[in-house]
Amino acid sequence: MKPWIKTPLVAALLATTAFSATAFAGPHGHGGCGWGKFDAPAVSPEQIKERMAKSFEVKLAKLELALALQPNQKSAWADFKQAMNARGEAFARGVEARRKAEPPKTVLERLDRAENASKERVKQLADTRKAVESFYGKLSATQKTVFDAEAGRLLQPHRDGFARGGRHGGPRGEQPGGQPGKGEPRAPTA
């Protein structure tokens, strides 16, 4: 083989081998790409439940501070907070039940579970609406504006996360910086 061909081939082979080895090693110094379930730290369901409860309490505390409640609104806030905590506990119980349940074996079982989950979600939404309506009626116009802006993070848990919003686009599919997300029409350019 001629030397002018051999040198680039050897360089390309070495670069490919080096790149493959670093990609295989992963970001944590062991095999895998760092995204799979085996690379995630082991977290028990109890730890997840505890983290969710703490996060929810922080969101409620921030909302309470943002609303600057008057003394005559404290009892309505307590009722609202109790209803929201009950909602969170029901959600946690549902997650635990689904985690412990045997996976559906047929499409009909899967559809039945989805239908039951949908009915339960509608019931939870109705209960949440009652609690919000009761509390909302006790707020001033300024507080209602604050509540409208802030309560979405409390009532829609995925709004800040990866599924809807967050890093993968805002509540309307916007990317960070206000750019339209995938599937969103772009403004016509002149």
Image (cartoon, rainbow, N blue to C red):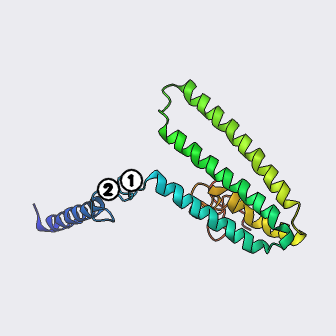
Residue at mark 2 to residue at mark 1: CA–CA distance: 7 Å
Q: Quadrant of the N terminus?
A: bottom left
- Pick the quarter of the image with the C terminus: bottom right
Q: Is residue 43 left or right of residue 186?
A: left
Vertical placement of residue 92 versus 52, above or below: above
Q: Is residue 54 visible?
A: yes
- In front of the other: 157 or 24: 157
Give residue 142's position: percent from left, percent from top.
86, 72
Residue 73: % across, % down: 84, 67
**On the image, which quarter does residue 8 sit in?**
bottom left
Q: Is residue 54 left or right of residue 152?
A: left
Type of amino acid under label 1? Gly
**Residue 13 at what x, y percent from top left?**
20, 62
Q: Is residue 47 left or right of residue 31?
A: right
Residue that label 2 marks: 32
Hey, which quadrant is residue 164 in on the image?
A: bottom right
Q: In the rendered image, which residue does mark 1 sit on?
A: 36
Element type at marker 1? Answer: loop
CB atoms of marks 2 and 1 within 8 Å: yes
Relative to 92, is 26 above or below? below
Mark 2 residue element:
loop
